[in-house]
Image (tube, helix red, strand yellow):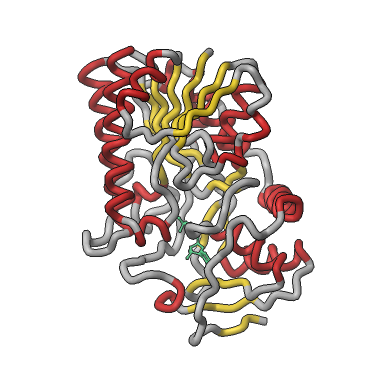
Amino acid sequence: MRALITGGAGFIGSHLAEALLERGDHVTVVDDLSTGRFENVEHLTANPRFQAVVETIMNETVMDRLVSECDILYHLAAAVGVELIVKSPVHTIETNVMGTEIVLRTARRYRKKVLIASTSEIYGKSEDTPYKEDDDRLLGPTTRSRWSYSASKALDEFLALAYNKEMGLPVVIFRLFNTIGPRQRGRYGMVVPRFVKQALAGEPITVYGDGKQSRCFCNVRDAVRAIDGLAESPGAEGGVFNIGSTDEINILDLARRVKDKTGSPSPIVLVPYEQATAPGFEDMRRRMPDVSKIRRTIGWGPTISLDQTLDEIIAYFGESGLSADTITQLAMPGAVVVR
Ligand code: UDP
């Protein structure tokens, strides 16, 4: 198979590229390196079945050629990370909506199968967890820019499903829940790399709010196995699937776990949201996927524990150093140290 991965130099895209190369596919990644990094795929460049194209997916001429040359398309390019989304809402909306339009249009031109990456943000702040693919969505107002991400990805989903229904384009949509692993950076939010970097640097570990908000963290290799399984399954076409872990942890306990594992002297501090986040930010108390649909369809379930994943991430930052991606230090007038 010749695979094209948009956003292939990003955190998840680079792991997917690696997995597809390992099983013998030809892989082209296209990435504008806005949040992706060439270092993520540098080790793949020696492989003759790999090529990287530094270009935006908004360049329809280039996309046309790349799509014409592939057998299957994995569309992962997007503006992601709550900090980036709140800071750059125009970029978020344009990349996520117009980029996907171009991807689907070119895929249709050459009748190529497309896997579209979506997100658990789709469910918004609904408290009806675990989330099932057909559940109602609950979004905040348009004046809070976080919700533009959810709305932009929902539009991507509508469009992809419409291409499938109206034109018979083979599409599969997968909604990634909090996915973590080596190569993820803390620059745009993402709690786990931030905590690990803070702990390794001996800086305060910054837990927002009361730390009782919870998430389920899925190892990127488990997520990649799910994406690959969906790509292989004809029964998945036209469907929407959650991909995530169901092992829940609250953010304060996560901070404690990272502190223990790194043996760090860092204090854990509770930072009020007003200090920590830009205006327009709203957090979710709880987020958990129902993964019964993907389990039924391709027999997938997560297998790698949070402990093992944290060990991998700690080792990654230990090896790659902490300097490449500095986390903005917070002014923390209202912060409280937790014992
Ligand atoms: N968070 C935190 N400290 C940080 C970064 C994030 O306490 O330095 C919290 C954030 O408020 C959220 C959770 O960690 O409740 C997960 O944040 P992330 O941005 O990783 O993913 P989200 O689930 O919000 O998309």
Residue 276: give x, y in percent of width and height: 46, 73
* Outermost right residue: 263
Does 202 sit above or below residue 284?
Answer: below
Residue 23: give x, y in percent of width and height: 65, 18
Q: How many badges with numbers are in the image?
A: 0
Residue at x-position 61% and y-position 17%: 49
Does 275 sit above or below residue 26?
Answer: below
Does 184 sit above or below residue 281?
Answer: above
Between residue 92 and residue 231, name the one nearer to us: 92
Residue 89: give x, y in percent of width and height: 30, 55
Residue 180: give x, y in percent of width and height: 59, 48
Residue at x-position 51% and y-position 33%: 8
User: Can residue 2 be seen in this snapshot?
Assistant: yes
The quadrant in which the C terminus is found is: bottom right
Residue at x-position 46% and y-position 60%: 286
User: Can residue 125 be seen in this snapshot?
Assistant: no
Residue at x-position 49% and y-position 86%: 334
